[in-house]
Amino acid sequence: MDTIASLFSFITTPVSWVIVQFHSVYGKIFGPDTGWAWGLSIVSLVILIRICLIPLFVKQIKATRAMQTLQPEMKKIQERYKNDKQRQSEEMMKLYKESGTNPLSSCLPILAQSPFFFALYHVLNGIASNQTIGVINESLLASAQKAHIFGAPLAAKFTDGSAKVEALGASLTDVRVVTAIMIVLMSASQFYTQRQLMTKNVDTTVKTPFMQQQKMLMYVFPVMFAVFGINFPVGVLVYWLTTNVWTMGQQMYVIRNNPTPGSKAQAAYLERLTHHVTHHGKTRRRSEKTIIKAIVAKGRDRNEFERGFINALTKSGLVAQADGTVVKGEAQAATLTEDGVATTAAAKRQQPKRQTKAQRQSGGTKAAGDSPSDSSDSSDPSEKTTSLEKSDEPQDAKPAAQQPQKGGSNGRSRAQSGQRKGGPQRPKSPSKK
């Protein structure tokens, strides 16, 4: 560990200086030799580091989303070149380059914290060894050795012997109990952080090796923290427990306000967004507009939660625009396709009613969709006369022999035996003579 600490010795002085500055503030409130002053100084160091790492955290989220999007393509490459590992790696790197994705981006916050972690470990180890380090002089060293958190010195470890613990002014039982509780809390917070990521913020419609890997890490990381935690000083346990709690809260905020498409978190978010937008009739925050803009741009590629959101807006008389805003529309004149795309329904063309033979001969043909009252209320009598003359003209031109004759019990017209009904007669066939 001395070799590793020496590699990060360049950052030991800045870390110790930040701790001393916070200690000077908290020391005026709680006392310079108290565990609260030194413990809160370490907590403040964590918060300061995590605030500076927020841009890297944003890149981590984007990288994780991009990796989830590429999982189907990565699975195809693995199946296609399962017997050629070199070609598989080349195709993977080509896919990363084309999509602009870096797999290491998801590890940036952890990698960026590593120097501060080892620097803090080196500082606390120097306090336990009664050695000045960085800007911590002899007076500050004596004050840090007196500081106890719930009876456990900052530099004490779970694996320390009774002689070393007594030299720090504490009992072995207190150190073991405090460190064990902190290790359990540290592992539990890590497990819950990974679990909420897997259960709420993962697209459940796609089953990929990435999901299996994340599920395995959900159980591996807490075990690793428990194993290595017994060798961490109490101050380092405070540092790591604080950063785990920060990560858990930060991830809960991201899952609630910017969930992964297709996940349970997105379904809950869109339900809240639907209630908010339909109640106020508009979007207020930029994040809401960004989400709606992305949903509208997907078109037919929307998932079931996004289609339900568009349907709910349409039923409420609202229409989502391409810029992420929401405007009022006519819900009665809008119909929805199966993929949730709102389309305006055109007026159906009305088919004309079927008329009887008597109506066609009398020239009483009406426009399709006109009621009888509309035709009877016409104010121009010349139009009626013209229509009657046109309809009667073909009937007057017919010869009397071709006029239908009424007769018989059924009142139907019959042609004479051996003759056709109207028109010139066909000559008899010579074969029938």
Image (spheres, rainbow, N blue to C red):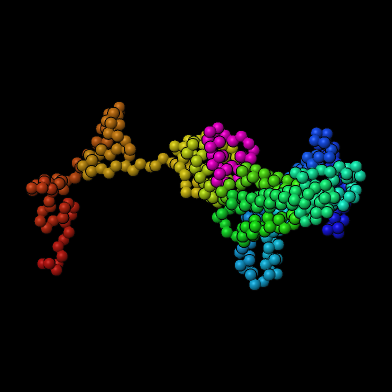
409 over 419 or under it: above or below: above
- Asked whether 21 or 333 is in front, the reply is 21
Q: Is residue 207 left or right of residue 397?
A: right
Residue nearer the viewer, 392 or 355? 355
Residue found at the very far bottom of the displayed protein: 83
Quadrant placement of the C terminus: bottom left
Residue 335 shows in this picture:
yes
- Residue lying at 67% horizontally and 58% vertically, measured from the top left: 220
* Residue at image point 61% right, 39% down: 288
Q: Is residue 354 left or right of residue 49?
A: left
Q: Position of residue 311 (x, y in %)?
A: 49, 43
Residue name at image x 25 percent, y 38 percent: 364
Residue range highlighted in magenta? 266-294
- State the residue at coordinates (87%, 56%): 6
- Going by the image, does 4 lie left or right of 416? right
The x, y position of residue 217, in whole percent, is 66, 58
Quadrant where the N terminus sits is: bottom right
Residue 273 located within the stretch drawn in magenta: yes
Give the residue furthest to the left.
409
Which SS type dominates the magenta stretch?
A: helix
Residue 239 visible here: no
- In the picture as drawn, the residue positioned furthest to the top comes out as 379
Nearer the observer, 417 or 271: 271
Residue 4 x/y as whole percent: 84, 58
On the image, the x and y values in percent for residue 97 come to 71, 58
- Say whether residue 363 is left or right of residue 217: left
Q: How many marks?
A: 0
Between 48 and 145, the one nearer to me in the picture: 145
Residue 36 within the magenta-colored segment of the rendering: no
